[in-house]
Amino acid sequence: MNISEIARLAGVSSAAVSRYFNGGSISAEKKQRIKKIIEETGYVPNPAARSLRQQRNDNIGIIVPKVNSDSVSSLVEGASSALNKAGYMAIFGNAENDEKRELEYLRMMEESKLAGVILMGTILTPKHIKFFKESRIPIVVCGQNHPSVTCIYHDDRCAAREITRYMISKGRRKLAYVGAVESDECVGLNRRIGVEEAMIEACISPTELMRTQVHFTMNDGYCGMCEILDRGSVPDGVICATDTLAVGAIRALKEHGFAIPGDIAVGGIGGGSAGTIVIPALTTVQLYHRESGDKAAKQLLSMIDYLRENPDEKLPTSHIMLGYTLIERESI
């Protein structure tokens, strides 16, 4: 008999049973149901596991790289909703695209004995990996994939291949790519590889790809597109690593007098709201950021329950890759 079985018999969550034993906030009705099952089964909490429970609280850390992003807000919405339903409170950390600050937040949240952490990852440095391997706090990383930590990530490579295939199917073969910094392996490196794979399938040499590497704002997309145009070679199709970059690229193309998609087609990746309000509306590949947050929270809660019941065991890691959907609009 363990906490999960008590929760199942009482028809409540494992978190509710944990709060019952720790004197936390719980409704009178749930408290009575849990008490009844404990009396019927004669359950006595494991002292070691209970000691671990008493050292922790019901707060979950969510660390994001920035706050002004559709993908971030969607992920936070999904994670917060799942955590709220389970009776946990989210504590946020904005790393402002600084991997050192991410590590500071991770250490602070571990020292504060939070129940667990969701990290929306961008650049996983050797120091990150060392922390993942040594930390006892449950951690789920969203948006990146590494064997040392549980991850919920997107099929970035195939998503980029899909939008490029679509672009080529519409007769665009002189391609440019406004890419993200490749120290971000999933968004930067994997999406560029996906673009090049689609070109190879269509018998177009990747050496013909006009590309630049920028950061993540609309202005970065604008500057990256201007840089490509200033080289003097004009593409007939532009793939951008994110929708945000694509909106900036569209502005640059319009300022240079090009019609979209008449002269140059533009495609993005992400499926954020920015692509629905720009003119023409952006053809993109929808990624499921809210689902990512929801799955990350539920996976983290399972990890917390496992560790509380098995305090001396190492947490197993898992890796879940989410799919994507091509959204056809007017920019291609």
Image: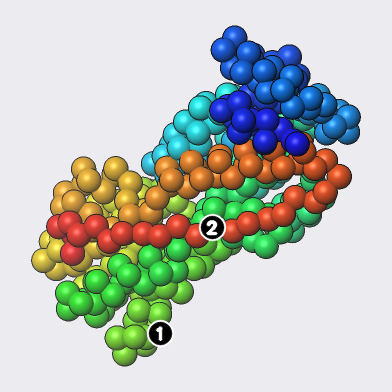
Residue 68 appearing in the image: no
User: How busy is the neighbourhood of tag 2: few (under 14 within 10 Å), some, or many (20 plus)?
Assistant: some
Amino acid at dot 2 = Ile
Question: At x 75% / y 36%, what residue is drawn?
Answer: 1
Q: Position of residue 150 (x, y in %)?
A: 64, 53
- The one nearer the camera, 315 or 44, is 44
**288 left or right, relative to 330:** right
Residue 24 figure quarter:
top right
Give the residue number, with chain letter if any, for mark 1.
Answer: 207
Question: At x 33% / y 46%, what residue is drawn?
Answer: 272
Residue 320: image tag = 2
Q: Secondary structure at mark 1?
A: helix
Q: How many marks?
A: 2
- The one nearer the camera, 281 or 262, is 281
Residue 45 figure quarter:
top right
Q: Position of residue 11 (x, y in %)?
A: 56, 28
